[in-house]
Image: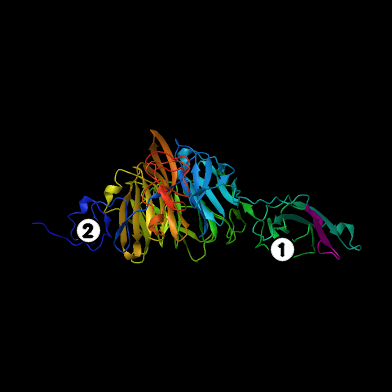
């Protein structure tokens, strides 16, 4: 006898057939045997996923590329097409052009290394790290003026040159009493906001008597390009201690009492000996980690500094931090995830960066605590609210990590327990997260399928669906455009027997009208009179229609499906 079952929700998404017998599981009651080319809404319904609009051909049809987001503000976003030794730029369905050709810049990154690039953005600067390349910044100076430059972990200011010192002394002081003491001096240069200070100059020594009547020493030096101020130090017991600061190129030392709490900076050369593989921001510092020769070291810039690895003797609380996690293996730190604490992910586990006896993160207070033994792959994690979602190092599953008050630490859980068939014997290639209109984690699988995971952890909502197309997905990223977060993808398709790769953009979920909706892939919109005759297709002047070529390129419209 047939039994009719009323389903009031599809909020469980696609589940594996190994779950069918689990009638006790709440997700079983709302799960689907197949959820292909649909998206699960958090409230329980499913809807047909929008189509993908054609944006551009990739530069090389025979090479893979990767998409990286650039988010300056909600209304200024861009998608970077990072390919074999180049970067191109796309925004709002368009490609940034320079004349009649796509604007692009040259990079050193080869195709094999693209998906292991680590990147972090601050305002209009993206820092890019990889263990095979010097750390670089990609800076936007103008719409068609992007510059890729090496990061200088030292200061950009040069030490002052030409330091000289002379003594002025009263006329009544006997000659034998004029040089009773030795004084050694050095000087540094600072920029306008004192965020950078040069190394100490070559020092100079003078025999003098600073305590005699009318005695003082005058120091002079040459101006340094880019410097707004200078600091002067005097050697006291082997430590150069602060005696004054000036915007001029001279200063008078009339027996000033030195401050040994302020000393000239030194610059860490450890990080310069290798290329860090990951980069992030946390607690007003930029953080690098995981070089080839020092895989379990992290380096944090001086507080409030972008790249400075300056420190002092004695050590100051705002100095750069250099530390190592001590583990049983030597797996490299792959990811730095800024949550309420800084999370370090390796291929074998997770560590939390904490402090010993203060809330402030300083060179003296930093500590590490192991949290779990579930490692991460090289795919960049995403942050969802107060949790981190990452691809597991083994098994191909997605895992969630968040803080548990009951357990007093960060714990990791498998998000794919109910849908392992979507991940087993495969790997996650790329990962990103969209917040609006629905919170979805997008992951590209090694079999070319795009997986949509509707995810609200605080409501215990997690539902998978598969997005498939005529071809395969190779990369995904998400940027905000208008009122939605829009996924951009790289697709590989066979057109006229040839492999072609495209940049495509998922159409908005909330279309203004039926005429402006789109449910085909690699589609385009055209408004106006046609310049080519297309059999069976006609439209009125001013009407917007979708032009589909079903596997063939229409040159004037540059559209395929």
Residue, disc 1? 258
**Callout 2: helix, strand or loop?**
helix
Identity of the residue furthest to the right in this view: 171
Label 1 environment density (alpha carbons within 10 Å; few <14, some 14–19, many ≥20): some
Percent across and percent down for residue 96 are 54, 47
- The picture places residue 341, in percent across and down from the top left corner, at 45, 61
Q: Which mark is first along the chain, 2 or 1? A: 2
- Quarter of the image with the N terminus is bottom left
Question: Is 353 or 545 nearer to us in this picture?
Answer: 545
Check residue 212 for magenta coloring: yes
Pick the front one: 498 or 112: 498
Whether residues under marks 1 and 2 lie with C-beta atoms below 8 angstroms apart, the answer is: no
Q: Residue at x 29, y 46 (%)?
A: 424
Q: Nearer the viewer, residue 124 or 61?
A: 61
Mark 1–mark 2 Cα distance, whole angstroms, equals: 74 Å
**With respect to residue 202, does 367 lie above or below?**
below
Name the residue that disc number 2 marks: 28
Which residues are the magenta region?
205-222
């Amino acid at each position: 006898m047939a039994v009719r079952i009323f389903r009031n929700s599809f909020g469980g998404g696609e589940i594996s057939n190994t779950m069918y017998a689990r009638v006790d599981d709440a997700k079983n009651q709302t799960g689907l045997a197949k959820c292909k080319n649909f998206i699960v809404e958090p409230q329980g319904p499913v809807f047909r996923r929008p189509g993908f609009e054609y944006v551009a051909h990739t530069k090389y049809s025979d090479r893979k590329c990767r998409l990286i987001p650039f988010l300056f503000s909600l209304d200024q976003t861009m998608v970077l097409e990072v390919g074999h030794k180049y970067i191109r730029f796309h925004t709002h369905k368009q490609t940034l052009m320079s004349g009649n050709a796509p604007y692009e810049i040259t990079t050193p990154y080869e195709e094999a290394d693209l998906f292991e690039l680590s990147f972090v953005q601050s305002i209009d600067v993206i820092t890019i790290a990889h263990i095979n390349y010097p750390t670089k910044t990609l800076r936007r100076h103008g719409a068609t003026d992007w510059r890729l430059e090496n990061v200088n972990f030292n200061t950009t200011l040069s030490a002052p040159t030409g330091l000289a010192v002379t003594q002025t002394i009263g006329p009544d002081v006997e000659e034998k009493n004029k040089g009773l003491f030795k004084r050694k001096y050095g000087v540094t240069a600072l920029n306008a906001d004192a965020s950078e200070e040069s190394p100490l100059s070559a020092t100079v020594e003078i025999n003098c008597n600073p305590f005699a009547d009318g005695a003082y020493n005058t120091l002079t030096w040459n101006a340094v390009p880019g410097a707004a101020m200078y600091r002067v130090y005097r050697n006291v017991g082997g430590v150069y201690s602060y005696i004054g600061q000036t915007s001029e190129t001279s200063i008078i030392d009339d027996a000033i009492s030195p401050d040994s709490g302020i000393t000239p900076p030194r610059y860490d050369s450890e990080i310069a000996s290798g290329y860090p593989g990951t980069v992030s921001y946390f607690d007003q510092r930029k953080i690098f980690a995981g070089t080839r020769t020092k895989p379990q070291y992290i380096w944090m810039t001086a507080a409030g500094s972008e790249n400075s690895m300056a420190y002092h003797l004695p050590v100051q609380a705002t100095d750069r931090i250099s530390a190592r996690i001590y583990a049983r293996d030597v797996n490299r730190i792959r990811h730095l995830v800024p949550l309420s604490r800084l999370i370090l992910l390796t291929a074998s586990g997770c560590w939390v960066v904490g402090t010993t006896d203060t809330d402030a993160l300083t060179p003296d207070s930093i500590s590490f605590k192991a949290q779990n033994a579930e490692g991460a792959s090289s795919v960049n994690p995403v942050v969802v609210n107060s949790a981190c979602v990452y691809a597991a190092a083994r098994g191909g599953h997605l895992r969630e990590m968040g803080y548990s008050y009951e357990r007093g630490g960060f714990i990791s859980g498998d998000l794919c327990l109910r849908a392992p068939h979507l991940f087993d014997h495969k790997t996650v290639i790329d990962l990103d997260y969209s917040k609006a209109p629905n919170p979805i984690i997008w992951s590209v699988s090694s079999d070319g399928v795009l997986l949509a995971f509707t995810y609200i952890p605080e409501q215990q909502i997690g539902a998978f669906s598969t997005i498939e197309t005529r071809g395969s997905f190779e990369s995904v990223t998400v940027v905000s455009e208008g009122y939605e977060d829009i996924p951009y993808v790289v697709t590989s398709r066979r057109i006229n027997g040839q492999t072609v790769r495209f940049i495509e953009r998922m159409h908005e979920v909330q279309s203004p009208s039926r005429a402006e909706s789109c449910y085909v892939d690699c589609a385009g919109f055209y408004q106006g009179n046609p310049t080519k005759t297309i059999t069976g297709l006609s439209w009125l002047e001013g009407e917007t229609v979708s032009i589909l070529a079903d596997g063939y390129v229409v040159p004037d419209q540059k559209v395929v499906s």
